[in-house]
Image (cartoon, rainbow, N blue to C red):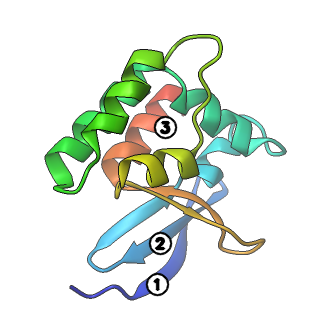
Amino acid sequence: MKTDIITTEIVVKENKIGIMRVGNVNYISLTDLARYKDKERTDYIIQNWMRTTNTILFLGTWENINNPNFNSVEFDGFKNESGTNAFVMTPKKWITSTNAIGVISKQGRYNGGTFAHPDIAFEFASWLRI
């Protein structure tokens, strides 16, 4: 499988949205989508989305369908905790705990951020109501 990473961007409603191509799949920047709501704290917006029960169930279903190495035991724990006041979820925690492939977290001032498979990115955009 080819694993070259190519980055580009598209413009939506006068806002740049990063696209990262990994192999044959385009991952859309959730960070850039979150800028529609708050330009300064995109990380909080993504974390708030990821802590909801509906999001955890959606992500778990997507991974179960598309990822043979998905750690469903860790997912079950997250599923049970999601939606509670004390539950916190970050992209990195999700990726490292469950072996997720639908979300990518990339550090860096330029071309960094949280990216997701289009199925997941469109779900996030729907939650944002953009």
Number of callouts in the render? Answer: 3
* Label 3 neighbour load within 10 Å: few <14, some 14-19, many 20+: some
In percent of the image, x 30 and y 80: which residue is there? 23
Residue 75 against residue 1 in the figure, above or below: above
Distance of mark 1 from mark 3, alpha carbons? 22 Å
In percent of the image, x 48 and y 19: which residue is there? 82
Quick check: 39 left or right of 106?
A: right
Q: Are marks 1 and 3 in contact (CB under 8 Å)?
A: no
> Which residue was labeled with disc 1?
6
Amino acid type of disc 3?
Answer: Ala
Distance of mark 2 from mark 1, alpha carbons? 6 Å
In percent of the image, x 29 and y 46: which residue is there? 71
Name the spot of residue 63 as percent of width and height, x first: 26, 46
Mark 1 or mark 3: name the one nearer the start of the chain.
1
**Residue 20, disc:** 2
In percent of the image, x 43 and y 27: which residue is there? 78
Amino acid type of disc 2?
Answer: Met
**For numbered disc 3, what is the local secondary structure?**
helix
Quick check: 5 left or right of 3?
A: right
Name the spot of residue 67 as percent of width and height, x first: 21, 54
Name the spot of residue 94 as percent of width and height, x first: 48, 45
Amino acid type of disc 1?
Answer: Ile
